[in-house]
């Protein structure tokens, strides 16, 4: 057999060189561990016992310590359940002089979870329809679990109409059907929407709100130059200040109030720019009475 040994003595008194296989194995073991640390090698170890704040596993014949916080992705209460198990670990600390070896199974698990996440994200593309579950609600939107991958529905993508809080539309734990808007594969971010692009009300606006027709709407917002009127959720039109009344109007608030239901006449529709021009003045104008025909002159009566 060829063996490796560390020289203990050059002369044991009888002219022999005294060697130690155990010391050689340990020296070479620390060298290998240093290489594992540098190369971030994933290794398989068997948990042998539980100690204070962690467990012990041997690697290259050297006693290694796995802290409880590095055993799993989540907190582990009973460490004894790991004894006898074989785990994949990575070396995170090697101090030969102090004979200190620290291993981590958590780092390997995190890396594999990240790989799975990237694979799932890589399979997504804008326009994909997915089933998900609302995990949490924030003032700016909702996070949805798509089966191990989280996506965000911004508040502006929850309804064609205006909402001030996501809780008006969703609740935690609710199952939802979402549409993928964008996938940032580098950052691992997924943008979602509850709004089906095919149901965009602006696509039907030209036919539904024909120029010249009179429709009903609700005043939703005042601006210095006029008032915005909601014709349906997601479709607002502008009544310019000059089209509010048959008189000079200084401020829209002088003639209208938010929440008021009014009749308006459609003046112009631009679905691409999402703009509709309306007129309350023309909608309120009384229909013109047909002009009376001039009276016929009486024919002279013959005597």
Image (tube, grey):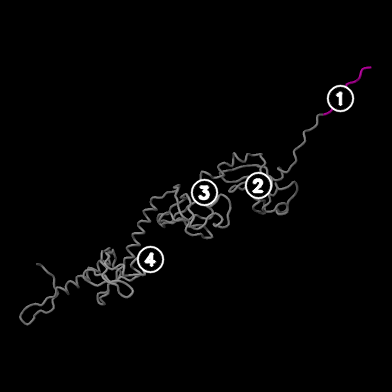
Residue displayed at 13% across by 70% down: 4
Q: Which residue is mark 3?
A: 195
Cα distance, mark 4 to mark 1?
103 Å
- Label 1 neighbourhood size at 10 Å, few (<14), some (14-19), many (20+)? few
Name the N-terminal-most of marks 2 and 3.
3
Farthest bottom residue? 13
- Label 4 neighbourhood size at 10 Å, few (<14), some (14-19), many (20+)? few
Q: Which residue is mark 1?
A: 297
Cα distance, mark 3 to mark 4?
36 Å
Q: Quadrant of residue 95?
A: bottom left
Residue 180 coordinates in the image, percent (x, y):
46, 50
Q: Is residue 184 above or below residue 213?
A: below
Magenta-drawn stretch, dominant element (helix, strand or loop): loop
> Would you say the residues marked 2 and 3 are in contact, meaning their CB atoms lie under 8 Å apart?
no
Cα distance, mark 2 to mark 1?
50 Å
Q: Residue 63: tell me if it is visible.
A: yes
Give the magenta range. Answer: 294-303
Name the N-terminal-most of marks 2 and 1.
2
Residue 99 coordinates in the image, percent (x, y):
25, 75
Name the N-terminal-most of marks 3 and 4.
4
Q: Which residue is mark 2?
A: 217
Cα distance, mark 1 to mark 3?
69 Å
Q: Which residue is mark 4?
A: 74
């Amino acid at each position: 057999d060829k063996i490796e040994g560390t020289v203990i003595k050059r002369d044991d008194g009888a002219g022999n060189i005294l060697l130690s296989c155990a010391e050689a194995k340990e020296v070479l073991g620390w060298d290998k561990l240093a290489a594992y640390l540098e190369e971030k090698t994933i290794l398989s170890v068997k948990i042998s016992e539980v100690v204070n704040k962690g467990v012990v596993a041997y690697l290259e014949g050297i006693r290694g310590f796995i802290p409880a916080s590095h055993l799993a992705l989540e907190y582990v209460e009973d460490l004894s359940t790991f004894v006898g198990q074989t785990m994949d670990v990575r070396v995170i600390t090697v101090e030969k002089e102090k004979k200190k070896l620290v291993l981590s199974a958590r780092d390997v698990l995190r890396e594999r979870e990240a790989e799975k996440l990237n694979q799932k994200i890589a399979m997504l593309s804008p326009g994909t329809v997915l089933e998900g579950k609302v995990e949490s609600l924030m003032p700016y939107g909702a996070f949805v679990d798509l089966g191990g991958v989280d996506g965000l529905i911004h508040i502006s993508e929850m309804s064609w109409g205006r909402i001030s809080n996501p809780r008006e539309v969703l609740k935690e734990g609710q199952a939802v059907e979402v549409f993928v808007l964008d996938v940032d594969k580098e950052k691992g971010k997924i943008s979602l929407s509850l709004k089906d692009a095919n149901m965009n009300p602006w696509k039907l606006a030209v036919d539904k709100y024909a120029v010249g027709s009179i429709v009903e709407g609700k005043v939703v917002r005042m601006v210095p130059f006029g008032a915005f009127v909601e014709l349906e959720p997601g479709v607002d039109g502008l009544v310019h200040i000059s089209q509010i009344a048959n008189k000079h109007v200084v401020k829209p608030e002088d003639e209208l109030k938010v929440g008021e239901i009014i009749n308006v006449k459609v003046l112009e529709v631009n679905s691409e720019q999402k703009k509709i021009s309306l007129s309350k003045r023309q909608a309120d104008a009384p229909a013109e009475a047909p002009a009376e025909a001039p009276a016929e002159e009486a024919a002279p009566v013959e005597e």
